[in-house]
Amino acid sequence: MSGPREACGIFAVFNHPDAVELTYYGLFALQHRGQESAGIACIMDDRIKSYLGMGLVGEVFNEDFFDKFSSHRAIGHTRYSTAGSSNVRNAQPITVDYSGGQISVAHNGNLSNGWELRRELEEAGSIFQTTSDSEVVLHLLARPEIKNSENPIAEALKRMQGAFSFVFLTNDAIYAARDAQGFRPLAIGKLGDSYVLASETCAFDMLSIEYVRDVKPGELIRIDDKGLHSSMWSEPQNHAHCIFEHVYFARPDSRVFGLNVHLARKA
């Protein structure tokens, strides 16, 4: 595949009876960000259940999927391979069980110190199931010094360098984070009492979701039954938005980094 390959699409829904179906349509709207694989993870019977496959969103998820998957909370991902080989093993969301519980992650971007962290974690006994740099954050969360901290996800993010947006699914919450420079986009929306997260606002428009704001650079969002909670895992640094979002990755009808993509391309 020619051209830049550093865009993936991420989407998440909290507190909606049709969260899985909404996530499917959200990924459909974000299909341009990744045609290699697609996946959805959701909470069913107090456990994370996931469905992953190679190909386009419409090819991966069939009627059988919708018959078996239903939830009020879900996250989804469409993938371009930025780090790691092209096979279903590297499809996301990636879900793990560890002593802290279950957690699933969907990631857009690259970790510049991903291989360095991987070697460090493997030397400490971690066994990786994928070749994707996205799995690194899950192994960091399992480290005792991070798992036992007051805010494990924030502590894990502090170890990572690069350009990234993350969404995490746990049994009781959805988390979202952006790198300190805001290189990769991630937007917050609302649909009634439900919160939605997406790489681009075009996914909101398709589903009549109200755009609220972008996740701030260096911000960590937690969405649970009490609402949306914001904290900063890092002080914001000089903003370094990815220029390819406006000229290549994003759909023309999206609003990315506060700018309409169509107008930015005409400028």
Image (cartoon, grey):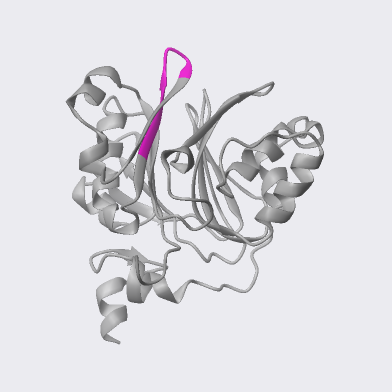
Which residue appears at 43% of the width and 49% of the height? 86
Q: Count of labels shown?
A: 0
Which residue appears at 30% of the width and 30% of the height? 20
Tell me if I can see residue 152 in this picture. no
In depth, the one of 18 and 94 nearer the eye is 94
| Residue 87 horizontal/vertical position (percent) | 43, 44
| Horizontal side, residue 92 vs residue 34: left or right | right
Q: Is residue 236 above or below residue 232?
A: below
| Quadrant occupied by the N terminus | bottom left
Which residue appears at 25% of the width and 25% of the height? 65
In depth, the one of 8 and 23 nearer the eye is 8
| Residue 29 horizontal/vertical position (percent) | 24, 51
| Quadrant occupied by the C terminus | bottom left
In depth, the one of 114 and 256 nearer the eye is 114
| Horizontal side, residue 78 vs residue 6: left or right | left
Q: Which residues are magenta?
A: 39-47
Q: Is residue 230 above or below residue 267?
A: above
Which residue appears at 28% of the width and 49% of the height? 210
| Residue 136 horizontal/vertical position (percent) | 64, 44
